[in-house]
Image (spheres, rainbow, N blue to C red):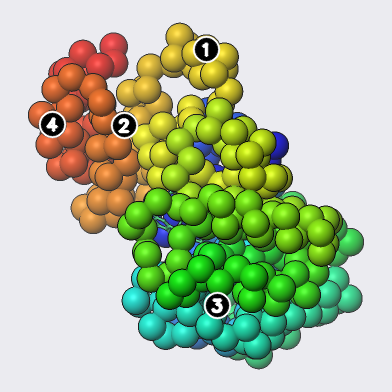
Amino acid sequence: MILALSPMDGVSDFPFRAINKKYGKMDIIFTEFANVEGICRSSSARILDHFDFNEAQRPFVAQIYGKTPNFFKQAAVLLCELGVNGVDINMGCPAPTVANHGSGAAIIKNPELAREIIKAVQDGIREWSEGLKLEDCPDISDLMVAGVAEKKKKFSLVDADRRKLPTVSVKTRIGYHNEEIETWLPHLIEMRLAAISLHGRTLKQGYSGKADWSVIGRAAAMLKKEDPSVVFLGNGDVLDYEEAEQKVEEYGVDGVLIGRSSFGKPFVFLPKQERERFFKEQNIFKVALEHAKLYEQTYPETEGYRFLPMRKHLAWYTKGIEQAAVIRSELVRSNSSLEVEQILKSHSLID
Ligand SMILES: Cc1cc2nc3c(=O)[nH]c(=O)nc-3n(C[C@H](O)[C@H](O)[C@H](O)COP(=O)(O)O)c2cc1C
């Protein structure tokens, strides 16, 4: 069974992924998504923060979204240069800021564009393997080229091997307004992807209702018949390792992506026995503090607003404990790991 950390915009940044990988030991990590138009047009290299990773986070899959095939191609070259293990294309985001512009899950309605985008990514990777350089990509700025070099230095990333190419995969939903897997999936199968991840909701559903695993099961059967070489991952509402195992057994998927249930709980990826060992050996609030410290180290200009994104994680770590509301109300106002440490100590949650 393959267990993966699902891509989550605004959540699965470098520190979150590092903590989850260290304690959850999942097989694959996806980044939050980054926009290819932004990669090719942005006047700042900040967008590259989405792809921060080090060797410990491998196998590491970077997710991109957008609607311009040519920009996908150049973003794929950039990701090759960074040395990621996989490039995942988002065809599942329902957010109006994404889907109303023809990207994310809106691509389900435009299979021709889906094919063009996948081909563009595959072409970018192939041309890079044949010697194409990032600086030769017409829409990649010098700033971005320098940014990639800086990231490689910062995270001690070795120069990518042009013979070991990143895989190409797609993450999508079961349909747009309604479930339409029988007509949508064949377009993806045709493109000979390495992997497909399927979230069992439509665009229209957003995150409401329940993920429909029976549709995921039908998709698995279809894929195994048409192209058994494609790794197929199901997604939606899976709580932990045991539930993932049950989905594999019942629906014939190769593995599962876990998203929201990992919030403040890196241990959900561990089988029961290891989870019990985790609880014996670790104090989850020590893990929370480690997370906050790593956050500061990764984004050193944390004073003021830069610490804000860390606060929601701190709140998640308090879920289910006594006095959670009081402790949470203090943690979500903290501005540094030092303050976090003081709060946790004052409630005797750490020594
Ligand atoms: C805050 C948040 C951000 C998300 N961002 C992304 C994203 O960047 N790319 C993506 O493919 N899916 C994204 N998703 C969807 C998740 O990856 C996943 O498909 C969904 O949450 C269902 O899985 P779960 O029930 O295990 O959370 C996001 C979900 C949440 C809650």
Residue at 23% from the left image edge and 22% from the top image edge: 321
Q: Which mark is residue 174?
A: none
Q: Is residue 349 left or right of residue 12?
A: left
| Cβ at disc 3 under 8 Å from ligand 1 | no
Q: Kindly identify which residue carries mark 3.
A: 108
Where residue 191 appears, x then y in whole percent? 77, 74
* Mark closer to the chain start, 2 or 4: 2
Q: Which mark is residue 317?
A: 2
For residue 116, above or below residue 303: below
Q: In which quadrant is the C terminus drawn?
A: top left
Q: Kindly identify which residue carries mark 4.
A: 325
Q: Residue furthest bottom?
A: 138
Q: Kindly identify which residue carries mark 1.
A: 277
Occupied quadrant, residue 112:
bottom right
Dot in front, 3 or 1: 3
Q: How far apart are the two marked residues, 3 and 2, measured between alpha carbons?
A: 36 Å
Q: What is the secondary structure assignment of the residue under circle 2?
A: helix
Q: As shown in the figure, which amino acid type bears the numbered disc 4?
A: Ala
Residue at 42% from the left image edge and 59% from the top image edge: 9
